[in-house]
């Protein structure tokens, strides 16, 4: 759970820096993210972000929703357990 929280905070910082136009800071956050978090945690984080954004905007086709949901179930992530 700690790794997932760290990844989420770094990902959010990366997005915020990029949206503010600070690409150097965004690149630093991305480097820290990839160096301190496992590929599985990063993949899960990005899948979760895609699922959330798609649901929030109402632009997530049913097949993509099912694919992302199945990924969470198959990897037994914390999000799939609740």
Image (spheres, rainbow, N blue to C red):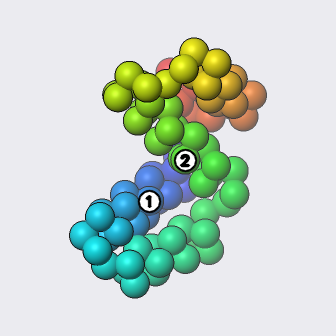
Q: Is residue 73 above or below residue 29?
A: above
Q: Is residue 24 above or below residue 78?
A: below
Q: Residue at x 64, y 49 (%)?
A: 43
Q: Residue furthest top?
A: 62
Q: Residue furthest left?
A: 20
Q: Residue at x 29, y 74 (%)?
A: 21
Task: Evaluate whether residue 40 shows in this view.
Answer: yes
Nearer-the-camera pick, 29 or 67: 67
Q: Residue at x 44, y 59 (%)?
A: 11
Q: Is residue 80 above or below residue 20?
A: above
Q: Position of residue 42 (x, y in %)?
A: 60, 54
Q: Residue at x 47, y 41 (%)?
A: 49
Q: Position of residue 31 (x, y in %)?
A: 55, 77
Tag 1: Cα neighbours inside 10 Å, few (<14), some, or many (≥20)?
many
Relative to residue 48, is residue 77 drawn left or right?
right
Q: Looking at the image, tell me whether mark 2 or mark 1 is earlier in sequence order.
A: 1
Residue 68: which quarter of the image? top right
Tag 2: Cα neighbours inside 10 Å, few (<14), some, or many (≥20)?
some
- Between marks 2 and 1, how big is the CA–CA gap? 9 Å
Q: Position of residue 19 (x, y in %)?
A: 29, 64
Q: Residue furthest right?
A: 74
Label at residue 1: none
Q: Is residue 24 above or below residue 51?
A: below
**What residue is pinned by disc 1?**
11
Tag 1's secondary structure? helix
Nearer-the-camera pick, 64 or 82: 64
**What residue is pinned by disc 2?**
46
Contact (Cβ within 8 Å) of mark 2 with mark 1: yes
Relative to residue 4, is residue 52 drawn left or right?
left
């Amino acid at each position: 759970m700690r790794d997932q929280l760290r990844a989420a905070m770094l990902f959010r910082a990366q997005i915020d820096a990029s949206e503010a136009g600070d690409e150097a800071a965004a690149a630093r956050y991305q480097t820290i993210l990839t160096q301190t978090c496992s590929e599985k945690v990063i993949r899960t984080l990005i899948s979760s972000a895609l699922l959330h954004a798609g649901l929030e905007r109402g632009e997530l086709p049913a097949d993509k929703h099912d694919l992302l949901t199945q990924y969470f179930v198959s990897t037994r992530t914390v999000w799939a357990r609740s």
